[in-house]
Image (cartoon, rainbow, N blue to C red):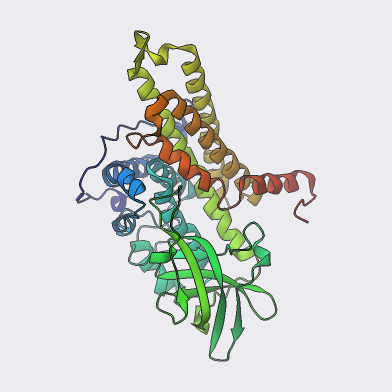
Amino acid sequence: MNHLLIDQEIDFHKTSKADLFESPDFYGIDDLLTEEHKMIREAVRDFVKKEISPIIEDCAQKAQFPRQIVRKFGEIGAFGPTVPTDYNPNGGLDYIAYGLMMQEIERGDSGMRSTASVQGSLVMFPIYAFGSEEQRRKYLPKLASGEYLGCFGLTEPNHGSNPSGMTTHFKDMGDYYLLNGAKMWISNSPYADVAVVWAKNEEGRIHGLIVEKGMEGFSAPEIHNKWSLRASITGELVFQDVKVPKENLLPNISGLKGPLKCLDNARYGIAWGALGAAMDCYDTALRYAKERIQFDRPIAGFQLIQKKLAEMLTEITKAQLVCWRLGMLKNEGKATTAQISLAKRNNVEIALNIAREARQILGGMGITGEYSIMRHSMNLESVVTYEGTHDIHLLILGHEITGISAFR
């Protein structure tokens, strides 16, 4: 695992206090991990402490995306780590390793995890799984290294939870495809070099197209004034008579199952990532409660504070077990869409609740940028919506339980 343990040249102006994070492990989950898993986790945790924690509050306050992080993610192998080494020198890892990486990155910031998981699960995965050998060779190494940044175009202004209703479409013009339409709420898009775009052909069948920056008629305006994921870059994708070469069509998939398979991978990473955010809020609240003196003793000694901390640890422990078991199922090729939905919905919900309870423990200090809690809380308001809303995941699970779809 030398690619994860390389010395990092750190060059930044420190803008926040030291990152003292220690992860909870009440049920000894570490005993279920391999030594390689633990090495990967510690390497990424160290990376977050050195590269993300010192700058992230300033980035969030200024609503600036730290573009230098893209190359650095590539250096530590955070992009597409499950892609085989034939296309990614830092790849070949299992899904537990991938989950732990997402956990540690989102412990730093949800927006940073979004950057990594979009690149790996929504751009590299479909090119690897559905692309031609020529497409794999052309794009995957550059995406893995961070030379290229990618984005995923599915959601539209009028079609979010119902992607089958998309209106973005393309026509066969003989030598090329002519693409028209628009996508909305696209992470990475303003800086992306390539976009995996899902659109309907003339028969109404959904296909994936690789659209490159610089193609005439293709633009990606940034979305401003966000109160959530402020350190992440979000935008639109606009296609006005874009000529897409025929070799840019993903040849090995058609229909909605293509983008939905991508979303399964992304939702799996979110389940681990949200757990990281929850852990950070818990660790911050516990540390503060032991130091904050009221009525001549630390507030950690009061019953209501202990109740909050005990409930946080309980939910984190349950979520850790869900993630580990789901990771094992992913490794075996057995994880279902419904199982992934359960983990994504549950873990984001508990992370939101823990962030709110932790904010209360910190009192007024909890809303300041001196601590990470309010930033996590705002970020998680996006995480609970994207890649399938909280309610949509309940309905996916309800369909699995009853055999009756509530979508129609």
Q: Is residue 276 visible?
A: no
On screen, residue 262 versus residue 1, left or right, reads right
The residue drawn where x is 31% and y is 55% is 66
Q: Residue furthest top?
A: 296
On screen, residue 180 versus residue 93, left or right, reads right
Residue 143: x and y in percent read 38, 65
Residue 94: x and y in percent read 46, 50
Task: Between residue 280 and residue 385, name the one nearer to us.
Answer: 385
Q: Residue furthest bottom?
A: 174
Please state, as top left, top right, bottom left or bottom right, where the C terminus lies in the image. Answer: bottom right
Vertical order, 387 against 165 (above or below): above
Quadrant location of residue 319? top right
Vertical order, 57 against 388 (above or below): above
Q: Is residue 382 visible?
A: yes
Quadrant location of residue 178? bottom right
On screen, residue 331 versus residue 104, left or right, reads right
Task: Between residue 152 and residue 9, name the one nearer to us.
Answer: 152
The residue drawn where x is 29% and y is 41% is 49
The residue drawn where x is 77% and y is 52% is 405
Residue 283: x and y in percent read 39, 29
Residue 293: x and y in percent read 34, 14
Vertical order, 185 against 137 (above or below): above
Quadrant location of residue 64? bottom left
Task: Between residue 223 and residue 95, name the one nearer to us.
Answer: 223
